[in-house]
Each structure stands twice: as C-alpha cells, then as structure tokens.
Image (tube, rainbow, N blue to C red):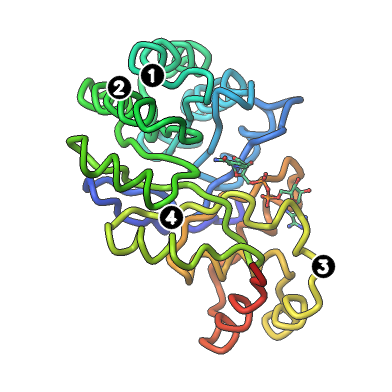
Amino acid sequence: MTGVSTERVTLHDGRSMPVLGLGVYEIEENVADTVFKAIELGYRSIDTAAMYGNEAGVGEAVRRAVSLGIAKREELFITTKVWKCDLGYDQTLAAFDRSMEQLGLDDVDLYLIHWPGSDRQNVETWQALERIRAEGRAKSIGVSNFEPEHLTLIMDQCERKPVVNQVEFNPGRTRRQLHAFCKEHDIQLVAWGPLGKGKFVGHPQLEQIGQKYGKTAAQVILRWDIQSGVVTIPKSSREARMRENADIFDFMLTEEEMALISSLDRT
Ligand code: NAD
C-alpha cells in the first residue's frame, strides 16, 4: 500500500467524495486488473462512463476488491456518466439501467450528465437523474462540461442542483470564471485531463517547483488541483504512475507557487 490519502471533500448533498481518484478513459485492456491494482494501492474513487466502454471491468474490480476484503463497498466511490446519445428522460433511465447491468453493482456513488445537450434535453435528463437519486440507485448526481448558463437553467427549472461539475482543468485551462461560479453555488469542481493528457508532465517551471519537494511535475499539478479546492482524477494504467500520482499528500505548495502555476494559463 502506498497509503493513498483518505482525504475527502463534502458535497452540498451531505455526502462526500475522495479528493483523488483514478480516471479510466481509454483504459481498454485488462480493465478489471488495472482498477483492482489501483484499489489495492489505496485508490478509493474510480471515474468511468458509459462512453468509455469499460464499466464492466470497473464493476468486476470493485466486486473482487470487496469480496477479498481489500475495501468495503461503502469506502469506494464509483462515478459513471450518461453519454450524449442518451439524453432525454426515458433514454437516460434506460442508459442508467444498462450502465448498472455493465457494472454489476447495486448502486453508483455519482451519476453525471457527460456533456450538455439542448436546454430541453438538459432539463429532462436532469429530471431523470433526480428520479434515479430519489430511488437510491445513484447516491449523488452531477454534471460534466457544463457552462454557467447550463447550470443556471438546471438551478432555475429543477428541484436539485448538481453536486459536481466535472470539467477540463489543468495549468493550461484554469476556468477562472466557471470555477468562481461553481464555488458561489457550492458545486464541487472535478478536474478531468488534469495532466493535460501528459502535456504538462515535463514543464520546466513545474519541474523546478517539484525539485524543492522531491516531487515530479505531475505531482506538483495534482497537488495544485487539491490546494485549489478541485477534486482530481488523473488517469494511468501503470502501477508506478498510479503510485506517483497518489503520493501528493506530504507537501504543501506556497501561495507564490500556486499563483505561478495558475499563471501558466494563457487562454
Ligand atoms: P490526464 O490529464 O489524466 O492524462 C493522462 C495521461 O497522462 C496518461 O495517458 C498518461 O500517459 C499520462 N500520465 C499519467 N500520469 C503520469 C505521470 N505521473 N507522469 C507522466 N505521465 C503521466 O488525462 P485524461 O485521461 O484525459 O483525464 C483523466 C480522467 O478524466 C479520464 O481518465 C476520465 O476518467 C476523465 N475524463 C472526463 C472527461 C469528461 O468529458 N467528463 C473527458 C476526459 C477525461
């Protein structure tokens, strides 16, 4: 065990999620073994989606880890998402059933709208998520890739607001306005593509900051996410990188370093 931190953040519905998780986009081979390894290493949050085509492997890993006593089901936080082609009330209910069949679990911890569609689709899809939550099949519900106008529509027209908004967030894309909007409305930001798909892992300024702490640029970025109040879900299928990405809880970036990393965003 690397002793991945059990640090969690409280969501506005009273539930909580780990600040670090494993993203599994484009993990297509040996999915169950990869996710099982991550759980063995101490990861407790796994981010999948119907679109990734690997929910079955994630579910298998969760069942294996629980049956072997490596983690209790309630310690694991499983996220999946409804894809664009299934937006709409009835379509989403059916898509959720298919996801649950693939996962082979009784419930998920977080169900997200993967990408916004039209206003009408967003409202109807959200109403389906509200029903799924009310039935206890998804413990929490949220969105992904939503802009403030999409969030405003949901907040104006629906009963509940999303607990999270999962968006691209990295030193090249800090989403200042969106981040401020989500903070104001108590919607937790979750960073997808935190390493810019690997683009920032050799960045000289990040490497320089890392040298001070004996950390890599990747670790500096993931630490910056967490200190920015953003949940992060880096993807790796390699054990060494999974360990590296999780070894970020024994140092603190200074305010100057945080500001310098944020200033790398030229968008
Ligand atoms: P990422 O920024 O996590 O980068 C992943 C790539 O970086 C890996 O393929 C690997 O090559 C490299 N990498 C990982 N750790 C490294 C390390 N320590 N050192 C060097 N290189 C390293 O990109 P991502 O996979 O696109 O995003 C993470 C997760 O976010 C996805 O797996 C998925 O779960 C989620 N995601 C969600 C959406 C969405 O629309 N909601 C979109 C993309 C990704």
Q: Residues within 10 Å of mark 3 (few under 14, many from 20)?
A: few
Whichever of labels 3 and 4 marks the residue nearer the N terminus, that label is 4
Question: Gap in Å between the C-alphas at discs 3 and 4?
Answer: 25 Å
Circle 2 residue: 128
What amino acid is labelled 3 in the image?
Gly
The residue at 56%/80% (across/down) is: 258
**Residue closest to the eye, 168 or 137:** 168
Whichever of labels 3 and 1 marks the residue nearer the N terminus, that label is 1
The correct choice, above or below, for 185 with respect to 84 in the image is: below
What amino acid is labelled 1 in the image?
Gly
- Give the label, 4 or 2, closer to the camera: 2
Residue 196 sits in which quadrant?
A: bottom right
Circle 4 residue: 189
Whichever of labels 4 and 2 marks the residue nearer the N terminus, that label is 2
Q: Are marks 2 and 1 in contact (CB under 8 Å)?
A: yes
Question: Gap in Å between the C-alphas at discs 4 and 2?
Answer: 22 Å
Whichever of labels 2 and 3 marks the residue nearer the N terminus, that label is 2
Q: Residues within 10 Å of mark 1 (few under 14, many from 20)?
A: many
Residue 91 percent coordinates (x, y) = 41, 13
**At numbered mark 4, what does the secondary structure look like: helix, strand or loop?**
strand
What amino acid is labelled 2 in the image?
Ala
Residue 219 percent coordinates (x, y) = 66, 66
